[in-house]
Image (cartoon, rainbow, N blue to C red):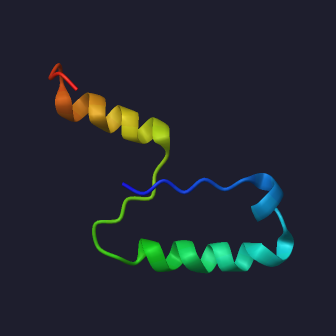
Amino acid sequence: MMSLVLHPFVINQPFRQKYLDQALEHIAQHPGVWLTTSDEITEHYARTTAGQPA
């Protein structure tokens, strides 16, 4: 798992947006990559572990 935290002060500069878009496109092209949110990870964990201890 790789978490990517983007602080608005840093990434919210217009000239940086195209580079972020390019990086995310590159990452997404790799097989097995799941671009998701923390909520979706939590839901997936709850579905796939069904009562098993963490």
- Note whether 47 is above or below 9 in the view shown: above
Residue 33 in the image: x percent, y percent?
35, 65
Where residue 37 sits in the image (x, y, percent)?
49, 45
Q: In which quarter of the view is residue 51 placed?
A: top left
Which of these two is toward me, 47 or 16? 16
Question: In the rendering, at what x and y percent does residue 28 appear?
Answer: 43, 72
Q: Residue at x 42, y 57 (%)?
A: 2
* Residue at position x 17%, y 21% in the image: 53
**Which residue is painted at 65% across and 72% down in the image?**
20
Q: Residue at x 54, y 57 (%)?
A: 4
Q: Nearer the viewer, residue 48 or 13?
A: 13
Residue 47 quadrant:
top left
In the image, residue 7 above or below residue 14: above
- Which quarter of the rendered picture does the C terminus lie within? top left
Residue 31 placement, left or right of 48: right
Q: How many marks?
A: 0
Residue 44 coordinates in the image, percent (x, y): 31, 38
Direction left: furthest residue? 52
Location of the N terminus (image quadrant)? bottom left
Query: Is 8 on the left-hand or right-hand side of 27?
Result: right
Position of 1 compared to 48: left or right?
Answer: right
